[in-house]
Image: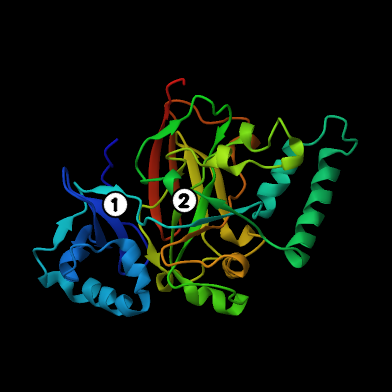
Amino acid sequence: MKSEAPSASFSGPFALGTFSAPDQASFPGLVVPEGRVLDLRDAFRDPALTTRLLFERWDEVLPRLEDLAAHGAGLADGWRPLDGLRVHAPVEPRQVFQSGANYRQHVIDLELAHRAPDDPRTPEAARAEIAEVMDRRAAQDLPYVFIGLPSAITGPYDDVVLPSWAEQPDWELELAVVIGKPAYRVSVPEALAHVAGYTIANDLTDRATVFRRDMKAIGTDWLRSKNAPGFTPLGPWIVPAASIADPGDLRVTLKLNGETMQDESTEDMLFGIARLVSYASLTARLLPGDLVLTGSPAGNGMHWGRLLRDGDVMDGSITGLGAQRTRCIAGEAS
């Protein structure tokens, strides 16, 4: 599916993305609110430049990007109208770190949805008990982070193919953190200095395959449930961290066929961005361009009893980061 023409809506003077003209190679671009995109290969005189390579030199290139956004109008040959360009996923990460069970209300809703039929508690009593556990977890426990595959990433306006084996495909709109310099064993106070910017991710999940049916002791199967091709629409662009005043106070909204399903603040996160980045870095070395997905707020399909199907259209937006639109199409039976 060809990208629709998006509006250049985001906080700050510029954002970064990956774009292409019809029948041409993709390029890293600086997009400004007026709806123009500067081909950064021209501006940096580097035909091999990619968005990820910019993050590998983030401290060096950021002042240059700021200058281009403010004073680069004279580079007439490098600017193109956003309208008419295809918008790809803004970066190709080497690693994707995903946070699960990180929104208080979301976890409470999921726990209630999966209550045993013989649970003697009233829904109100169960909710209060689960809420108490969540508050204790935020104060005393560790984040829950697992690994996703870069091959699941697709563009913010591309069709999402629902595999025939996915019985319960669900949406999970999330704030995604983009790493700007290597992070290994960084403390919580140091963590945000390693963040280059933020973007939008929809971390689709097949609920039917989250837990192994053949061997329950193994637990979750994130490979099967989350990593089909196209299961992570990303973008439309990356907004530099300096342009987001408080990433802990952004509105995450997903509409399904025009009806609001998710509408929650990142303030509801159990573990904030600094804690997530620090925790992941205690085990793994986070690299420039890597993604840290921060978890999904309440309002998933399991909560509503309405899962994704052929023809559905998802509109996702986060304050200051723009919006994405993806259409679901049924995959062919294998």
Which one is nearer the viewer's eye here, 211 or 109?
Answer: 211
Q: How is the image coloured?
A: rainbow
Q: Amino acid at mark 2?
A: Ala
Mark identifier at residue 242 = none
Which one is nearer the viewer's eye here, 90 or 227?
Answer: 227
Q: Amino acid at mark 1?
A: Ser
State which quadrant residue 268 falls in: bottom right
**Residue 42: horizontal and vertical position, in percent?**
15, 66
Q: Tag 2's secondary structure?
A: strand
Q: Quadrant of the N terminus?
A: top left
The residue lying furthest to the right in this view is 120
Of pointers 1 and 2, the one earlier in the residue sequence: 1
Residue occupying image coordinates x 68% and y 35%: 212
- Left or right relative to 55: residue 232: right
Q: How many marks?
A: 2
Residue occupying image coordinates x 73% and y 34%: 215
The residue lying furthest to the top in this view is 333
Which one is nearer the viewer's eye here, 172 or 262?
Answer: 172
- Left or right relative to 26: residue 53: right
Residue 275 visible? The answer is no
Q: Which residue is mark 2?
A: 201
**Residue 189: horizontal and vertical position, in percent?**
59, 79
Residue occupying image coordinates x 73% and y 47%: 108
Q: Which residue is mark 1?
A: 7
Q: CA distance from mark 1 to mark 2?
A: 18 Å
Front position among marks 1 and 2: 2
Badge 1: how crowded within 10 Å, few (<14), some, or many (20+)?
few
Badge 2: how crowded within 10 Å, few (<14), some, or many (20+)?
many
**Residue 22: horizontal and vertical position, in percent?**
17, 43
**Residue 275: horizontal and vertical position, in percent?**
62, 68
Q: Tag 1's secondary structure?
A: loop
Residue 160 visible? The answer is yes
